[in-house]
Image: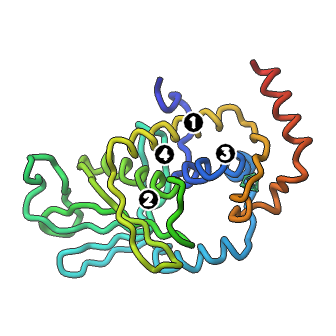
Amino acid sequence: MPTTLPDESPIMLSALQHYLFCPRQCALIHVEGVWSENFLTAAGRQLHERVDRRGGETRRNVHLATALRLTSQRLGLTGVADMVEFHRRETPQDESGRIVAARLPGLSGYWRPFPVEYKRGVPKSHRADEVQLCAQALCLEEMLGVAIDAGALFYGETRRRTEVAFDSGLRTLTENVAEEVHALMRTNLTPPPHQGKWCNACSIVEECRPKLSCRSARDWLKKQVENM
Ligand code: SF4
């Protein structure tokens, strides 16, 4: 089954992360357009200040591209990468003959991409951040025609990078989540709340009001049954 239908709009890369965190959060933000400015989003914005402005800078053998626009026609994705490091190489192939580096405008040599995503807090037990990063890599691979083996997540609280390998398991998970988010967008419906301790870390808990949304849950279930 294809990930996107021919005339379907691309989904935001961040929607994959939101969906894995909570499908309702994903629908509230990406279907209903709900957003709220609070201490969680402010912390995230502060962390992103350095990488929110589009730009490029070359230091010796590394080119840093910030706020780089990404797209994947195959997966129907669009969005912006916080930062992509491009590491200079003399040849486009690695030792096993795979194309891993591309030409960049105005720069000599070949450049191997390494996406870095900035996240508030600490490394999580779920894989939502890894999936968002892997989706960025899948976009870059399609746009540049290269293979990308790894990237990194930088967490604001630990101020450390966690390297992420884009292995077959993570790639399959990312493609499956992209498919599920497209399916959610097609329904144009917001799932009912699934309340849990994760709601404490949700940036739109005030708008969701998980404890008060039982009525919405009943409406949603009713619509699902009617659409069967
Ligand atoms: S408050 Fe809880 S149920 Fe509501 S969107 Fe956030 S995580 Fe999901």
Residue farthest to the top, as pictured: 228
Other-residue count near label 4 (Cα within 10 Å), few / some / many at <14 / 14–19 / ≥20: many
Residue at position x 39%, y 67% in the image: 162
Q: Is residue 30 above or below residue 200?
A: above
The tag earlier along the polypeptide, 3 or 2, is 3
The tag earlier along the polypeptide, 4 or 2, is 2
Q: Is mark 4 on a helix, strand or loop?
A: strand
Q: Which label sits in the foreground, 2 or 1?
A: 1
Mark 3 residue's CB less than 8 Å from ligand 1: yes
Marks 3 and 1, how far apart in space?
10 Å
Residue with the mark numbered 4: 77
Residue with the mark numbered 2: 69
Q: Is residue 228 above or below residue 218?
A: above
The quadrant of the picture showing ligand 1 is bottom right
Residue with the mark numbered 1: 180
Give the residue type at disc 2: Arg
Residue with the mark numbered 3: 23
Q: In this view, does 53 lie above or below 126?
A: below
